[in-house]
């Protein structure tokens, strides 16, 4: 298995996913080791000179005017981890914690935090050895960064808190003992450096964006399948239409669906029918999918900027031997991007649910009611549409923006916050809901395709159908649909449907 080098070079979302989901190990570059040591030497010098530096020789937040004596600097750093560990709610899952750890290391690798190399190496060793701190997901207001969850993450470095290791939840001290790691005694500046950053919202958001990128392609596949069985036209995918309105996402979606449905005998069979034009959920699918796709790629650009950024305060600049106080920890860029993505992904699900309704409604589809024979005795996919309706309604509620809210903290010293981590968590949930809706549409589309025994669908549609049917049999009588939906979702998440389609029609945009 390859090792990902973390340094000044750009980290991609694909790198983050490799670390978070596939357990790829990480290592610092030599250049980063040098930068980290240079910044740390300055901190040590300034502490000896008793220079007043926020969070190093002073208190935090509204207590920044309180001077901390040199003898108390170590205790100050331990105290900030304990006092800020006030999280609530469910625990972040393993892949998210791995992503947070990787992004925290990436931030430190830029050499602006003043943290010791030894401390960064401790965090890196924990990640590589499979130690995942227990981190509550609620409590961050998104400025000054993700203080609360990052404090919980960092407790384990000093032998406090809890972590998962080899599937077991144990105390920080025990987990370090199991791994042969010695708990650290933090030095000046390190407690603040460990917790002051946007890595939790960036980790949650980065994984959500990656999933949304794949979901955009899967939504095109589901829509193309629905269009065929609903006897729709490929005219709406004609590139001349989209050149006349050149939004990049719209053109990409149209191109995808044009190629997925190529050589479709089903579409060709009714090209001279009496229908003038298709319903919006088919005819306008490139425009709707495309607008959401543009939202996804806007969020991708923001996230890839953020995961390669220094978000500490103060920031150390070894080349000029200075420290600067600023606000790079403020999560507003992530908050806005995630709230925008919430709406974009919700629209993937919204239009999909309307196509599901067309598929199961015999008055709209011309197909058997709820896509099953012997209706009445069998309900078929009737209630699958209910589930999709519930999911899209939940997404509408979750799409209310978090970034427009702000509650002052720290005695009004920190008087505007981003709520970016709430935005990211909402977006994660919306992506999961949308995956379920698209899985239902794919199931319904495959069920409808079973009725077209004498005509072949498009090349891409057939590839998707084959993967689904290899895992889920035709529904000839009622059975537990939950299992079928989960099976298709699993095929989506593992990339099996997308891979099969792309082998037939080329890489989707």
Image (cartoon, grey):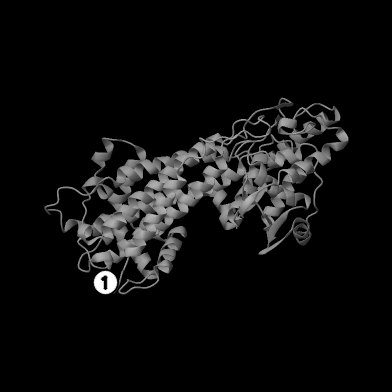
Tell me the quarter of the image containing the N terminus: bottom right
Q: Is residue 412 left or right of residue 114?
A: left
Does residue 12 appear in the picture of this structure? no
Residue at (38, 57) in percent of width and height? 388
Residue 479 in percent (x, y) is at 37, 73
List the residue tagged with mark 1: 376
Q: Is residue 428 left or right of residue 284?
A: right
Q: Is residue 164 left or right of residue 283?
A: right
Mark 1: few, some, or many residues within 10 Å (few <14, many ≥20)? few
Q: Secondary structure at mark 1?
A: loop
Residue 335 in percent (x, y) is at 53, 38
Q: Decide: is 166 above or below 187.
A: below
Q: Decide: is 14 above or below 167.
A: above
Decide which of 507, 188 is in the foreground and name it: 188
Decide which of 155, 22 is in the foreground and name it: 155
Residue at (74, 36) in percent of width and height? 114
Residue 184 in percent (x, y) is at 80, 48
Does residue 47 appear in the picture of this structure? yes
Residue at (36, 41) in percent of width and height? 291
Decide which of 361, 31 is in the foreground and name it: 361
Q: How many marks?
A: 1
Q: Decide: is 498 above or below 40.
A: below
Residue 293 in percent (x, y) is at 39, 43
């Amino acid at each position: 298995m390859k090792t990902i080098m973390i340094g000044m070079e750009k980290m991609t979302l694909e790198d983050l996913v490799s670390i978070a989901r596939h357990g790829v190990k990480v290592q610092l570059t030599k250049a980063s080791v040098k930068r980290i040591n240079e910044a740390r030497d300055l901190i040590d010098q300034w502490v000896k000179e008793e220079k007043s530096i926020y969070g190093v020789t002073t208190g935090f937040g509204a207590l920044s005017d309180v001077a901390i004596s040199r003898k108390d600097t170590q205790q100050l750093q331990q105290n900030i981890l304990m006092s800020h560990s006030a999280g609530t709610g469910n625990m972040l899952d393993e892949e998210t914690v791995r992503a947070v750890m990787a992004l925290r290391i990436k931030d430190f690798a830029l050499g602006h935090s003043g943290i010791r190399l030894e401390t960064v190496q401790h965090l890196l060793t924990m990640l590589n050895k499979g130690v995942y701190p227990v981190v509550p997901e609620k409590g961050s207001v998104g400025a000054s960064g993700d203080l609360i969850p990052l404090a919980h993450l960092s407790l384990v470095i000093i032998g406090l808190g809890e972590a998962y290791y080899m599937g077991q939840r144990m105390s920080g001290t025990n987990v370090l003992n199991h791994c042969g790691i010695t708990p650290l005694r933090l030095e000046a500046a390190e407690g603040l450096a460990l917790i002051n950053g946007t890595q939790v919202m960036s980790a949650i958001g980065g994984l959500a964006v990656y999933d949304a990128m794949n979901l955009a392609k899967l939504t095109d596949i589901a829509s193309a399948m629905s269009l065929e069985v609903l006897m729709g036209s490929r005219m709406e995918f004609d590139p001349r239409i989209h050149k006349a309105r050149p939004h990049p996402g719209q053109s990409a979606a149209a191109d995808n669906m044009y190629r997925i449905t190529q050589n479709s005998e089903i579409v060709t069979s009714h090209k001279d029918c009496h229908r003038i034009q298709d319903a919006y959920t088919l005819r306008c699918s490139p425009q709707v999918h495309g607008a959401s796709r543009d939202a996804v790629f806007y969020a991708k650009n923001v996230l890839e900027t953020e995961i390669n950024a220094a978000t500490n305060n103060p920031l150390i600049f070894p080349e000029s031997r200075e420290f600067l106080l600023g606000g790079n920890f403020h999560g507003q860029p992530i908050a806005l991007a995630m709230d925008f993505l919430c709406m974009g992904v919700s629209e993937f699900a919204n239009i999909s649910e309307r196509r599901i309704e067309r598929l199961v409604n015999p008055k709209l589809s011309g197909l058997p009611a709820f896509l099953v024979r012997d209706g009445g005795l069998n309900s078929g996919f009737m209630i699958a549409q209910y589930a999709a309706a519930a999911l899209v309604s939940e997404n509408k509620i979750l799409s209310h923006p978090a970034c427009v809210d702000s509650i002052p903290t720290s005695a009004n010293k920190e008087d505007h916050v981003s709520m970016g981590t709430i935005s990211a968590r909402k977006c994660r949930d919306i992506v999961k809901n949308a995956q379920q809706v698209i899985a239902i549409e794919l199931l319904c589309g495959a069920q409808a395709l079973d009725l077209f025994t004498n005509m072949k669908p498009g090349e891409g549609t057939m590839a998707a159908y084959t993967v689904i049917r290899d895992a889920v049999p035709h529904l000839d009588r009622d059975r537990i649909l939950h299992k079928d939906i989960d099976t298709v979702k699993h095929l989506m998440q593992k990339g099996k449907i997308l891979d099969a389609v792309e082998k037939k029609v080329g890489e989707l945009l």
